[in-house]
């Protein structure tokens, strides 16, 4: 194993298990690196995107205490026994897979690993003050972006209006945060894309109602990574109050937009918000009032776009069409300009 990195490390010398896993991988164009000894697996442990440990070597490898890492799964040809789960815990495995029942899951995993699609861009939107219109802008960005490829809008603000309602997708069945809040381990990008409420190339992941347990930082992180694997663009609608979960998302976004109203109170609130973000984030000015130059100086951040109020937008939302109708209007044009700051392909 001389390569600095590879896609899958398969740790086993069980010929039947090797044959089946390699068959599933070959169907997706993935060729695993095979380690038939625990010591060899340990040397290659950190270089693969995913590690699959056969039940035959799991106990011996656990005795070596390899460093904790993401993407480890233990695979058993037959029914998994209790000792195998104990070894999986020591290995830090995300799951114990029984090969027959998990064949489809593994096939999907290999398909994602063999997909040449580059990870999608992540554009986060945060209100600089109450009533700034951040969710409306996030929905507009997602609508305009979906004309160029698959887009997911992640609504992470439990106190917001609901991105599905703004987009007219609230009556569409599909996966929502309540189904993901208690999950763990790797999430399939393709499954996420196909499960959320969507219209054409635009999907939305939002709140189905009050949650007993909100998604943890780990769930948000894994959902975002899954979304990037299956979409050209992920737009994240962030809450105004940043906590550990929000911070987890901020570290993974390509661009952060803070939406500010050009009033004295709106600018004052946005100034505190940007300061709390340690200077991260560019501004989008919504509505009329103070000039963009004045807002930029007061807040201490660049103004990327000025979006005036748009006639007919509320009617468009009420009709279930979303805030942008046919890409026209000031909001649609501003969304296209903002998208071009993360990828020139969205400028048209």
Image: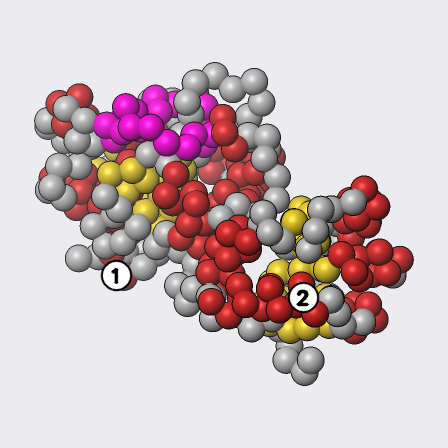
Residue 134 lies within the magenta run? no
Magenta span: 156-177
Q: Name the mark on residue 22.
A: none
Left or right: 210 in relation to 9: left
Residue for point 41% across, 32% down: 175
Residue 288 visible here: no
Left or right: 106 in relation to 176: right
Main SS type for the magenta part? loop
Tags 2 and 1 touching, CB below 8 Å: no
- State the residue in front, 343 or 270: 343
Identify whether 7 is placed above or below 179. below
Quadrant in the picture for the N terminus: bottom right
Q: Position of residue 304 (x, y in %)?
A: 30, 47
From the image, tell me which residue sits under label 1.
Answer: 345
Residue for point 64% across, 77% down: 4
Mark 2 vs mark 1: in front: 2
Q: Where is residue 307 in the image (x, y as percent from the top left)?
A: 21, 38
Q: Position of residue 249 (x, y in %)?
A: 51, 42
From the image, tell me which residue sits under label 2.
Answer: 16
Left or right: 225 in relation to 141: right
Residue for point 13% across, 37% down: 325
Instruction: Report helix, strand or loop for mark 2.
Output: helix
Q: Where is residue 73 in the image (x, y as percent from the top left)?
A: 67, 53
């Amino acid at each position: 194993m001389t390569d600095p990195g590879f896609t899958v490390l398969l740790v086993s010398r069980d010929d039947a298990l090797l044959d089946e896993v390699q068959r599933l991988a070959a169907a997706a164009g993935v060729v695993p690196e095979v380690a038939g000894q625990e010591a060899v697996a340990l040397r290659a442990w950190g270089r693969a995107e995913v590690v699959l440990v056969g039940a035959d070597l799991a106990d011996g490898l656990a005795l070596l205490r390899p460093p904790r890492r993401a993407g480890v799964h233990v695979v058993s040809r037959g029914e998994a026994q209790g000792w195998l789960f104990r070894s999986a815990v020591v290995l830090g495995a995300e799951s114990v897979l029984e090969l027959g029942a998990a064949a489809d899951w593994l096939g999907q995993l290999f398909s994602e690993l063999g997909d040449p699609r580059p990870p999608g861009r992540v554009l986060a939107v945060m209100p600089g003050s109450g009533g700034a219109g951040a969710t409306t802008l996030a929905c507009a960005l997602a609508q305009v972006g979906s004309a160029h490829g698959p887009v997911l809008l992640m609504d992470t603000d439990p106190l917001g209006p609901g991105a599905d309602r703004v987009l007219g997708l609230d009556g569409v069945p599909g996966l929502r945060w309540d189904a993901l809040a208690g999950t763990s381990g790797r999430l399939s990008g393709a499954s996420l894309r196909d499960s959320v409420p969507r219209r054409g190339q635009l999907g939305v992941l939002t709140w189905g109602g009050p949650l007993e347990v909100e998604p943890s930082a780990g769930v948000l992180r894994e959902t975002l990574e899954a979304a990037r694997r299956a979409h050209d663009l992920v737009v994240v609608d962030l809450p105004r109050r940043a906590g550990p979960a929000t911070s987890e998302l901020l570290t993974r976004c390509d661009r952060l937009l803070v939406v500010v109203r050009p009033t004295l109170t709106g600018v004052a609130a946005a100034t505190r918000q940007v300061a709390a973000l340690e200077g991260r984030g560019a501004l989008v000015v919504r509505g009329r009032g103070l000039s963009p130059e004045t807002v930029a100086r007061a807040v201490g951040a660049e103004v990327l776009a000025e979006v005036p109020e748009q006639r007919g937008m509320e009617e468009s939302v009420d009709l279930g069409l979303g805030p942008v109708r046919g890409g026209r209007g000031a909001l649609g044009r501003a969304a296209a300009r903002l998208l071009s700051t993360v990828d020139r392909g969205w400028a048209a």
